[in-house]
Structures are given as structure tokens and as C-alpha cells.
Image (spheres, rainbow, N blue to C red):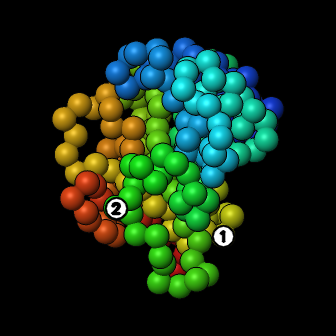
Amino acid sequence: MEFEIRKLTPALAEDYVRFFDATPHDDHVDEHKCYCVCWCDDDYEGKDFSSREKRRDWAGRYVREGNIQGYLAYYGGNAVGWCNANTKSDCLKCCSWRMFMDYVPVGESGGDIKVKSVFCFTIAPEMKRKGLATKLLERVCEDAARDGFDFVEVYPKKVVADETINFGGPFEMYRRCGFTVYYEAEQGLVMRKKLKE
């Protein structure tokens, strides 16, 4: 299948929210749709994300303002996949990062190391198991290398009881794409792919 991968821009705000509107969330409960609004920056103080509609409104605004970073995948002119990817130093400010990724080391071995973090995939049900997440990941790595990043970092769970809630991506996909284990914690792994020699 031929997928088109597009870096998220303000012009794609409507495509972004429509993709989340149409794509079932982990537990198929519509009210739980996240729209990835809590993974974008530290601008969550005082914001009301309590309902799907409110998260949708904030998502459109955040995309138009350039706060949410990542890639949309298209097939037949429709968005069918999403990968949230941002500079790790920006991710550390996000409320969901603080909640779910508290086991990830925050310091680097050198102050000038640039790390791109990939931490969420959402794929339309009919497009799963067609290599779409891999295509998204490959594009993140290509752009990160071109943009001067030293590493791309990912966070697979060590044990996944239900694949439908594995939004962090599977270990095997990362291994096949050249990632190696950088750090291991009880909650999960930190894997990295080196982009510079």
C-alpha cells in the first residue's frame, strides 16, 4: 500500500481532528479520545480537558499554533495514522509525559545532545498490520537526522497484555528499525537509534 506521510502543520488542523474523530481510541469508548492534547507542551495549566469535545477544541487550536508535533499518514486522501514526535526536552514539560514516562531518564551524557522522542501511535483499525507505524517511524528518523538530532528515542512497554492499548509502539518494530535498548525500568524500555556517527 502507498501511504503519504505529512509532517503536521497548522494547515492540517482539520485533518488532524477529523482523524481522531473517526478513529476508535484504545478502549473504543468515544469519550476517552485524547486528541494527544496532553503530550504537546506545558500549556495545560488552567485548561479544561474534561470532555472529548473540549479536548477536540484544544487540539485544533494547538495544531494551528504549532504546539502539537508529529506526522499524519494518508491513504486515498484521508488521514489514517498518527505519530506524536517531539524534541525530548519539550516532552518533559507535558502533563501526560510526567504521568506515564516518569521512569525515563531526563538527563543526557552531554548538554549538546539532541533527542527526538516518539511516544504515541494511533492507526485506523483497517490500516493496522500494514506497516504504517513503521513508515511513520522511518519518516521521523529521516527528518530528525536532517534536522541535526543525535538520537531518536522510543518507549515500548515490556509486557503488553492487550495490543489495542500499546500506543507506545511494539518492541519488535523498533528493533527491526535499528533501535537498541538504552535503559530498562520495571515499567518499560527506553530504546534509541543513533543518527550521527
- Where residue 135 appears, x then y in whole percent? 50, 41
Mark 2 vs mark 1: which is more N-terminal? 2
Vertical placement of residue 146 versus 150, above or below = above
Give the residue type at disc 2: Tyr
**Residue at the disc numbered 1:** 148
What residue is shown at x 48% (from left), y 78% (from top)? 108
Q: Is residue 81 visible?
A: no
Could you say which is closer to the camera, residue 94 or residue 78? 94
Residue 179 shows which numbered tag? none
Alpha-carbon span between mark 2 and mark 1: 26 Å
Dot 1: element: loop
Label 2: which residue? 103
Residue 13 located left or right of residue 194: right
Tell me: 51 left or right of 121: right
Instruction: Residue at 25%, 54% (x, y): give it.
Output: 187
| Mark 2 or 1, closer to the camera | 2
Q: Is residue 192 visible?
A: yes
The quadrant holding residue 46 is top right
